[in-house]
Amino acid sequence: MADNFHLVSNERDNYSLIHEGRVYNLKRTNMEDKQWVCRR
């Protein structure tokens, strides 16, 4: 199952998660604890 996930960084140091042809934008919510929120 983990083979279907791809993590891609963009020019602003944000990340996108790609899973089964869908792109989810990841937004950092807490710099110290490295917490992320996934947006579609």
Image: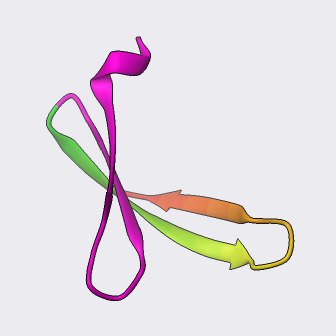
x, y (%) of residue 29?
A: 70, 75
Numbered marks: total = 0
Residue projecting furthest to the top: 1
Question: What span is in magenta?
Answer: 1-20
Q: Nearer the viewer, residue 37 or 13?
A: 13
x, y (%) of residue 30?
A: 78, 76
Whether 23 is among the magenta residues is: no
Q: Nearer the viewer, residue 10 or 40?
A: 10
Residue projecting furthest to the left: 21
* Quadrant that contains the C terminus: bottom left
Which residue is found at the position 29% from the left and 22% from the top? Answer: 4
Q: Nearer the viewer, residue 17 or 8?
A: 8
Q: How is the image coloured?
A: rainbow
Q: Relative to residue 11, is residue 30 depicted above or below?
A: above
* Quadrant that contains the N terminus: top left
Which quadrant of the view contains residue 3? top left
Residue projecting furthest to the bottom: 12
x, y (%) of residue 32?
A: 85, 76
Q: Relative to residue 27, is residue 40 depicted above or below?
A: above
Q: Nearer the viewer, residue 20 or 12?
A: 12
Whether 5 is among the magenta residues is: yes
Q: Relative to residue 20, is residue 7 depicted above or below?
A: below
Which quadrant of the view contains residue 6? top left
Q: Relative to residue 1, is residue 15 depicted above or below?
A: below
13 relative position to 27: left or right: left
x, y (%) of residue 13?
A: 41, 81
20 relative position to 4: left or right: left
